[in-house]
């Protein structure tokens, strides 16, 4: 049986799990458990001697002590006397390689080609401060989204490639969470529709909203929360439906590839409106070439009905149809909280692709 094999019992507490990492020699060992193969970093196996040489320890006896602290939670000794990473070792090792725990990245603003979905101006840019990428408009002086991006991603992509990489990263995260899976831990995600702007509704602090917006048509916000790790994400309801087969088929039939549109502006043809509050139903629609696709989503963000018909978007219903560029959505908070929740910053007015994640 391998060391740290079937007989290994994991640490009882989180502090016990992290205790072996509080030493530079042990961190160097975990770094050495990766090798670069044709420009790609890959986990590997190492002998005792190879790991010893990767550290600054002067004696093998001292090094052996440090190695024993890693065997179990982070390393496993194989039958051929080499060492390999455990699942936890892989996660920590990859985090070290990506700079997740050590790097704070700032980047010069990158100009974006897409117009602002709020004012249709052409002064959009993406800037990076402390690993948070913010898309903002210089014309109307508003931020569309502010989302964290791993330091390794900033290192891997130059200014020309960064916007697309940033878009793909968060587009797929939204899609994965909308499908019920957490991109952070793989846990079960609960989706729901939250309403803002309802008469007598709750404000951001949980009290009664006495602002001038009382009685305004309710707006919908998709909230996605992981029940396991607490990771949370909020965005316009439309963004949770972009990968639905009816949407993909509709846009494909009209010669449009939605993957070419970034999440901060998925197109002016989108509309959202709350058509019922009891039971809750949100109508998400898009009109192309005099044909309209409408999806009806329930409180849990599931698509309960689709309709595809000729003609302009039907504006009938209990709530007036509004462009998403005029919709209010979002959580007025920091870009990322201690619990891992990602939220929009700024004035919370969002456009078609303005994720509040």
Image (cartoon, rainbow, N blue to C red):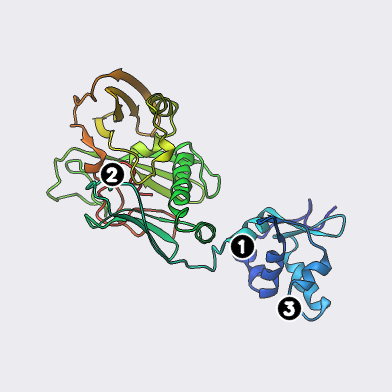
Labelled pair 3, 2 in contact (Cβ < 8 Å) = no
Q: Secondary structure at mark 2?
A: loop
Residue 7 point in image, percent of width and height:
79, 53
**Circle 3 SS class:** loop
Question: Is 124 situated left or right of 94 in this image?
Answer: left
Residue drawn at (26%, 52%) of the image: 204
Q: Quadrant of residue 201?
A: top left
x 35%, y 46%: residue: 264
Q: Which residue is mark 3?
A: 56
Q: Residue at x 33, y 27 (%)?
A: 296
Alpha carbon distance from label 3 to label 2? 53 Å
Q: Circle 2 is placed at which residue position? A: 351
Badge 1 density bin: few <14, some 14–19, many ≥20, Cα 10 Å: some
Task: Give the mark nearest the N terminus, 2 or 1.
Answer: 1
Residue 186 percent location from the top left of the image? 55, 45
**Separation of residues labelled 2 and 1 (CA atoms):** 36 Å
Q: Position of residue 113 (x, y in %)?
A: 35, 49
Residue 173 x/y as whole percent: 47, 45
CA distance for labels 3 and 1: 19 Å
Ranked by sequence position, the earlier of labels 3 and 2 is 3
Q: Visible in this render: residue 327?
A: no
231 up-or-down from 103: above or below: above
Identify the secondary structure beneath mark 1.
helix
Q: Residue furthest left?
A: 212
Q: Quadrant of residue 242?
A: top left
Q: Is residue 91 visible?
A: yes
Q: Which residue is mark 1?
A: 97
Q: Is residue 164 left or right of residue 8?
A: left
Q: Earlier in the sequence, mark 3 or mark 1?
A: 3
């Amino acid at each position: 049986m391998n060391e740290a094999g079937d007989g290994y019992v994991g640490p009882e507490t989180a502090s016990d799990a992290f205790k072996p990492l509080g030493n530079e020699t042990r961190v160097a060992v975990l770094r050495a458990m990766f090798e670069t193969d044709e420009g790609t970093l890959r986990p590997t196996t190492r002998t005792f001697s190879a790991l010893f040489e990767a550290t600054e320890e002067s004696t093998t006896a001292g090094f052996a002590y440090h190695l024993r602290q890693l065997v179990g939670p982070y390393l496993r000794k194989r039958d051929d006397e080499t060492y390999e990473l455990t699942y936890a070792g892989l996660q920590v090792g990859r985090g070290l390689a990506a700079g997740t725990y050590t790097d704070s990245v700032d980047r010069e603003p990158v100009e974006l080609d897409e117009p602002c979905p709020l004012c249709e101006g052409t002064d959009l840019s993406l800037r990076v401060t402390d690993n948070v990428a913010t898309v903002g408009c210089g014309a109307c002086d508003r931020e569309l989204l502010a989302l964290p991006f791993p330091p390794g991603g900033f290192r891997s992509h130059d200014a020309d490639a960064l916007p697309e990489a940033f878009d793909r990263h968060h587009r797929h995260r939204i899609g994965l969470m909308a499908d019920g899976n957490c991109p952070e831990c793989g846990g079960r995600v609960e989706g729901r529709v939250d309403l803002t702007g309802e008469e007598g509704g709750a404000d951001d602090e949980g009290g009664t909203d006495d602002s001038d917006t009382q009685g305004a048509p309710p707006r919908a916000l998709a909230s996605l929360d992981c029940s396991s790790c607490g990771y949370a994400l909020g965005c316009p309801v439309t963004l949770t439906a972009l990968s639905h087969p009816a949407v993909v088929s509709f846009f494909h039939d009209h010669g449009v590839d939605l993957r070419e549109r970034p999440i901060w502006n998925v197109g002016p043809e989108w509309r959202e409106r709350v058509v019922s509050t009891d039971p809750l139903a949100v109508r998400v629609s898009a009109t192309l070439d005099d044909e309209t696709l409408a999806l009806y989503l329930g409180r849990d963000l599931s698509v309960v009905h689709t309709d595809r018909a000729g003609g302009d978007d039907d504006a009938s219903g209990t709530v007036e149809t509004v462009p998403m560029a005029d919709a209010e959505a979002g959580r007025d908070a920091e870009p990322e909280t201690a619990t891992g929740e990602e939220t929009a910053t700024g004035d919370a007015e969002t456009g078609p692709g303005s994720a509040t994640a």
